[in-house]
Amino acid sequence: MESIGVLMACPMNPYLEQELHKRFNLHRFWKVPEKSAFLTAHSNSIRAVVGNASAGADANLIEALPKLEIVASFSVGLDKIDLAKCKEKGIRVTNTPDVLTEDVADLAIALMLAVLRKLCESDRYVRSGKWKKGKYMLTTKFTGKRVGIIGLGRIGMAIAKRAEAFSCPISYHSRTEKPEAKYKYYPNVVELAANCDILVVACSLTEETRHIINRKVIDAMGPKGVLINVGRGPHVDEPELVSALVEGRLGGAGLDVFEHEPEVPEELFGLDNVVLLPHVGSGTVETRKAMADLVLGNLEAHFLKKPLLTPVV
């Protein structure tokens, strides 16, 4: 398979890049100065694209690669891939579900604790020497808080199970009610937000879920509510979130993702009720290797004409 052209959309994982280089004819798209000329020159040799949450395969890239057979995403999210165009052209699409579920769910709980117990601010308090001058402020208990989850898929369910261990009542919103779920279902997000202390975004990013967290939802949460986003940045109307936090209309936020990554609104930097992470939901050594192995396994299965491990299209 060394002659098969594979286009890696952006830098994502050293192990994955190394293995792709060993097994295929790897092209690193981010290192190409003249991308249009490159695509023209390699239009008949590139048969696979590897993308992630930052860069994938849009309609223009797909049209520029007439021999493209498969897009393998180093991510569970598919919002950077034009799925309709892939279906139209018979291009296979895979992602990396399940292997990252536990890490993302762990991080969601960590963000809840970090925001409510002010862990980051407490750490800074000790490091700065302020503890010698007086005790730290009291914070907010997590156990027993009402947790609302938007998107009760693999990750949402894993978050719910973890929150239950803290005696948290769970409720959720999703496109349809899930009969197998024992949690209370709310048919709209505003109603869910009004009936929880912590609102967690864990759904896929689609046109329907873009800015699903808007001013109405934020106002329904109120000045004691906490927003946790481990989904995608564009799930949240970021200017509305910033103004609500600055004005005290929302109690706090734990954010692993942002609308225009890696740009983060500077107004958030000075707030001690906000915890900011650089999109590291699946960022453990173990999980990133498992994700890479899944990408490699899907590519090899496709080119060996075997069933794909995690097919989407």
Image: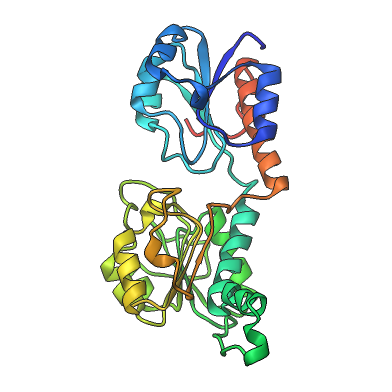
* Left-right relation of 169 to 33: right
Seen in the picture, residue 268 relative to 8 is either above or below; the reply is below
Identify the residue shown where x is 60% and y is 20%. Answer: 302
Identify the residue shown where x is 42% and y is 33%. Answer: 81
Quarter-of-image position of residue 91: top left
Q: Nearer the viewer, residue 22 or 305?
A: 22
**Residue 125 rendering spot, x and y as whole percentages:** 61, 79
Identify the residue shown where x is 39% and y is 78%. Answer: 195
Seen in the picture, residue 237 relative to 124 is either above or below; the reply is above
Quarter-of-image position of residue 214: bottom left
Quick one: quadrant of the N terminus? Answer: top right
* Left-right relation of 151 to 301: left
Seen in the picture, residue 31 relative to 100 is either above or below; the reply is above
**Residue 241 rendering spot, x and y as whole percentages:** 34, 66
Q: Residue furthest left?
A: 216
Quarter-of-image position of residue 193: bottom left
